[in-house]
C-alpha cells in the first residue's frame, strides 16, 4: 500500500510540475507529460510497463467521447475519407517502410511486419493536441481524424496477419530427447486467456464477432435509456459516473473477449449514443477520467524510453526515427495533394500524422510473442516508436510557425484596387461586421468593406455583397477606401492588436472621424478608449443584457421593469467603464492594480444600491399593478 501511494505521489507531482511549465512555454501538455515521464523513468523502473496497461484505458475513453460527438450520419459522410484517405495512407506507408527495412537487411516477412507497425500514428497524442489547439473542426483536423480512425480499425486485421509472418523458431532438444520450438511456451502462456472465439472455426469467429458488435449497438439504442431513468430515481450523482464507467469498461471487456479493439468498440458505442439525451451527462462524467488516464499514458511512454539501448547506438536510432517520419510525411503530403487538402490544412495533416503510435507498443509486443521479431530488434523498434511520439509536440509547434508564416504571406498578396468610396468604412467582415454592413446599407448609406481574408471577401461576393481584399491597418488601403472623407469608421477586426493599431492611426489622421470599435473584453475596451475610439461595443455585452432581461421577465418583473433594469444597468456600466479606464494601467494586470480593484468593488456596491432604489420607486408609483407577470414562453430572437 505504501509503495502504491509513493508511486502515485511521484506521478502526480511530476505531472503538476512539468505540464503547467510546458504549457507556459508553449510546448503543450502532451510534451509536458512525456518530459515528466522521462524525468521519473529511472525511479519507477519496471512499473512503467504495468502502468501503461492501465493508462491505455485513457485512449479507450477518448475514443468513446469522440464517438459521442459524431452522429451516425456524420460518420457515414466520412466514408470516402475513411476508405480512400485512411486506407491509402496505411497501404503506402507500410509499403515504403517495408522496402526501407528490407533494404537494411531484414527478411521480407519481418520488414512487412515493421511496415504495418509504423504505418500507424498516435491517436492519443494527436487528438489531444488537436483538441487543445481547437483544430479538430478544421479541414486538416477532420482529415487527420479520419485517418486515425481508419488506423484504429486496421489494428484488427493487423493482429490477424502478424502470426502468419512468424519466423521459424529455433529448435531446442529437451532432456527426454524431444524437440520443441520457442513459440510453444508463448502459446501455452496465452492458451488459458479468456476468449469467446478461441478454438472456433472461421465462420464461428465471424458470427461471434458480428454478435458482439450487434450487442453493443442494441444495448446502446434500447437499454441505456431505461437504465439511466432507473438511476435518475436514486438522485445520486456518483451513480451516473458509475454507470458511464460501466458502459465503457463492459464494452472494452466484451471487445477483448472476441479479439476486437476495445477502442474501436467504445467508439462505436459513442456513435450509437450520440443522439441520446444523456450524451452531455456521459461527457461530463467521463472527461476527468480521460484526462488523468491520458496524462498517465503519456508519462508511461516517456518513462518507458530505454536510454540504455539508445546510448549503444544513438546515431542509428535517431536516423531510423528520422527516416520513418520522413517517409510517412512524403506519403501524407502526396495524399494531401491527391485529395486536394490545401494550405494550412495540408501541413496540419502531414505534420500531425508522421509519427508512430501507441498501438505500435502493442503490435511490437505481440510480434515478439509470435516470434515475428527478435528481442534486440523489438527493443530498437520500441525506442523508435517512443522517440517519434516524443517529437510529435515539436511538429505541432513547427505547424504553428508555418501557419503564421502562411498567414503573413497571404497578407502580403497584392490587395484589391479599391474603386469606390463610401460614407462608412467597415474594417473586418466577420459575423459582427456583416450585420453592421447589412443594416447600414439597407438604411440607404454607402459602405466600403475591407478584410484581410481573401476567402471571406470571396464568400461575400458570392452572396452579392461587395468587399475588398486588403489589410485594413495599411495606411494606403485606408486612404484608397476614403478615410479622408468618410464620416464613420467601424473597426471589427478579430485581432486586438490590429484593432488598436487601426484606431490609433485613424484618430491621429482624422481627429473629427467618428470611430465605432468592437472590443473582445474590458481590457480591450480600455486600449481602444486610449487609442481614441468614440463608441466601443463589447462583443457579448448587448446580447448578455438581452438575455438578462428575459430572465427578469420570467422571474416576475413586467416587461417595462425588466427593460428599465436593463437600460439602467447599461448606462451605469458604460459610465463606470469610463472611470475604470482612467485608473487602468496597461503595465499592471488589473487584479494587481489596487486603485482599479477598489474602484471596481465600489462600483458593484453602487450598482446594486442604484438598481434596488429604482425597483422600490417602481413599486411605489404602482408600475406593478398586476403582481407577478406570467412568463411569455414564445421564443424571441
Image (cartoon, rainbow, N blue to C red):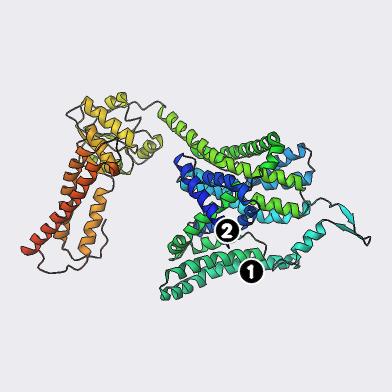
Q: Residue pushed farthest right?
A: 177
Can residue 58 be seen from the camera position used here? no
Can residue 69 be seen from the camera position used here? yes
- Residue linked to disc 2: 57
Measuring from the top left, give residue 582's x and y in whole percent.
19, 38
- Residue linked to disc 1: 211
Q: Is residue 9 above or below residue 453?
A: below
Q: Residue at x 8, y 60 (%)?
A: 617
Mark 2, Cα crowd under 10 Å, few <14 / some 14-19 / many 20+, is many
Q: Residue pushed farthest left?
A: 621
Measuring from the top left, give residue 125's x and y in whole percent.
55, 47
Q: CA distance from mark 2 to mark 1?
A: 23 Å
Q: Of helix, strand and loop, which one carries label 1?
A: helix
Q: Quadrant of the C terminus?
A: bottom left
Measuring from the top left, give residue 296's x and y in whole percent.
55, 53
Query: Looking at the image, is mark 2 or mark 1 nearer the viewer?
Result: 2
Amino acid at each position: 500500500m505504501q509503495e502504491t501511494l509513493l508511486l502515485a505521489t511521484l506521478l502526480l507531482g511530476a505531472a503538476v510540475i512539468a505540464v503547467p511549465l510546458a504549457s507556459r512555454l508553449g510546448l503543450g501538455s502532451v510534451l509536458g507529460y512525456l518530459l515528466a515521464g522521462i524525468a521519473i523513468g529511472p525511479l519507477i523502473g519496471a512499473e512503467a510497463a504495468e502502468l501503461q496497461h492501465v493508462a491505455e484505458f485513457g485512449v479507450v475513453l477518448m475514443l468513446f467521447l469522440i464517438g459521442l460527438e459524431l452522429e451516425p450520419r456524420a460518420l457515414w459522410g466520412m466514408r470516402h475519407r475513411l476508405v480512400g484517405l485512411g486506407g491509402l495512407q496505411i497501404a503506402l506507408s507500410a509499403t515504403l517502410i517495408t522496402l526501407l527495412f528490407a533494404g537494411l537487411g531484414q527478411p521480407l516477412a519481418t520488414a512487412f511486419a515493421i511496415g504495418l507497425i509504423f504505418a500507424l500514428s498516435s491517436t492519443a497524442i494527436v487528438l489531444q493536441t488537436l483538441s487543445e489547439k481547437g483544430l479538430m473542426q478544421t479541414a486538416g483536423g477532420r482529415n487527420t481524424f479520419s485517418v486515425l480512425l481508419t488506423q484504429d480499425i486496421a489494428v484488427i486485421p493487423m493482429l490477424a496477419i502478424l502470426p502468419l509472418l512468424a519466423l521459424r523458431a529455433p529448435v531446442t532438444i529437451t532432456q527426454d530427447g524431444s524437440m520443441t520450438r520457442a513459440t510453444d511456451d508463448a502459446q501455452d502462456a496465452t492458451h488459458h486467456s479468456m476468449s469467446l472465439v478461441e478454438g472456433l472455426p472461421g465462420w464461428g469467429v465471424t458470427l461471434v464477432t458480428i454478435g458482439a458488435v450487434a450487442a453493443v449497438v442494441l444495448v446502446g439504442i434500447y437499454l441505456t435509456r431505461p437504465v439511466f431513468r432507473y438511476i435518475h430515481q436514486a438522485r445520486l450523482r456518483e451513480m451516473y459516473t458509475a454507470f458511464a464507467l460501466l458502459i465503457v469498461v463492459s464494452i472494452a471487456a466484451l471487445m477483448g473477449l472476441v479479439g476486437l479493439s476495445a477502442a474501436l468498440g467504445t467508439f462505436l458505442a459513442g456513435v450509437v449514443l450520440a443522439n441520446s439525451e444523456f450524451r452531455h451527462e456521459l461527457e461530463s462524467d467521463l472527461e476527468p477520467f480521460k484526462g488523468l488516464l491520458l496524462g498517465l499514458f503519456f508519462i508511461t511512454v516517456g518513462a518507458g524510453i530505454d536510454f540504455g539501448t539508445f546510448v549503444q547506438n544513438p546515431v542509428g536510432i535517431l536516423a531510423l526515427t528520422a527516416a520513418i517520419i520522413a517517409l510517412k510525411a512524403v506519403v501524407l503530403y502526396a495524399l494531401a495533394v491527391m485529395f486536394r487538402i490545401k494550405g494550412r490544412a495540408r501541413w496540419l495533416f502531414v505534420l500531425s500524422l508522421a509519427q508512430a503510435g501507441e498501438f505500435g507498443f502493442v503490435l511490437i509486443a505481440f510480434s515478439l510473442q509470435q516470434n515475428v521479431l527478435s528481442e534486440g530488434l523489438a527493443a530498437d523498434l520500441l525506442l523508435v516508436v517512443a522517440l517519434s511520439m516524443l517529437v510529435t509536440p515539436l511538429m505541432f509547434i513547427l505547424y504553428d510557425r508555418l501557419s503564421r508564416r502562411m498567414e503573413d504571406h497571404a497578407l502580403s498578396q497584392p490587395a484589391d484596387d479599391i474603386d469606390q468610396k463610401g460614407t462608412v468604412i467597415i474594417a473586418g467582415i466577420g459575423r459582427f461586421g456583416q450585420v453592421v454592413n447589412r443594416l447600414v446599407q439597407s438604411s440607404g448609406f454607402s459602405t466600403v468593406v475591407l478584410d484581410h481574408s481573401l476567402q471571406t471577401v470571396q464568400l461575400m461576393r458570392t452572396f452579392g455583397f461587395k468587399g475588398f481584399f486588403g489589410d485594413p491597418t495599411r495606411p494606403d488601403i485606408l486612404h484608397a477606401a476614403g478615410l479622408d472623407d468618410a464620416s464613420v469608421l467601424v473597426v471589427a477586426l478579430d485581432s486586438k492588436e490590429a484593432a488598436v493599431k487601426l484606431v490609433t492611426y485613424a484618430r491621429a489622421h482624422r481627429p473629427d472621424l467618428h470611430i465605432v470599435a468592437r472590443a473582445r473584453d474590458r481590457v480591450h475596451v480600455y486600449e481602444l478608449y486610449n487609442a481614441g475610439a468614440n463608441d466601443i461595443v463589447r462583443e457579448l455585452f448587448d446580447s448578455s443584457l438581452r438575455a438578462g432581461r428575459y430572465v427578469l421577465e420570467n422571474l416576475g418583473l413586467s416587461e417595462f421593469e425588466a427593460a428599465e433594469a436593463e437600460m439602467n444597468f447599461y448606462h451605469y456600466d458604460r459610465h463606470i467603464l469610463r472611470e475604470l479606464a482612467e485608473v487602468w494601467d496597461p503595465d499592471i494586470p488589473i487584479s494587481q492594480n489596487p486603485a482599479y480593484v477598489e474602484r471596481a468593488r465600489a462600483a458593484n456596491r453602487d450598482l446594486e444600491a442604484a438598481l434596488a432604489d429604482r425597483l422600490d420607486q417602481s413599486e411605489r408609483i404602482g408600475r406593478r399593478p398586476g403582481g407577478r407577470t406570467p412568463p411569455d414562453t414564445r421564443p424571441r430572437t
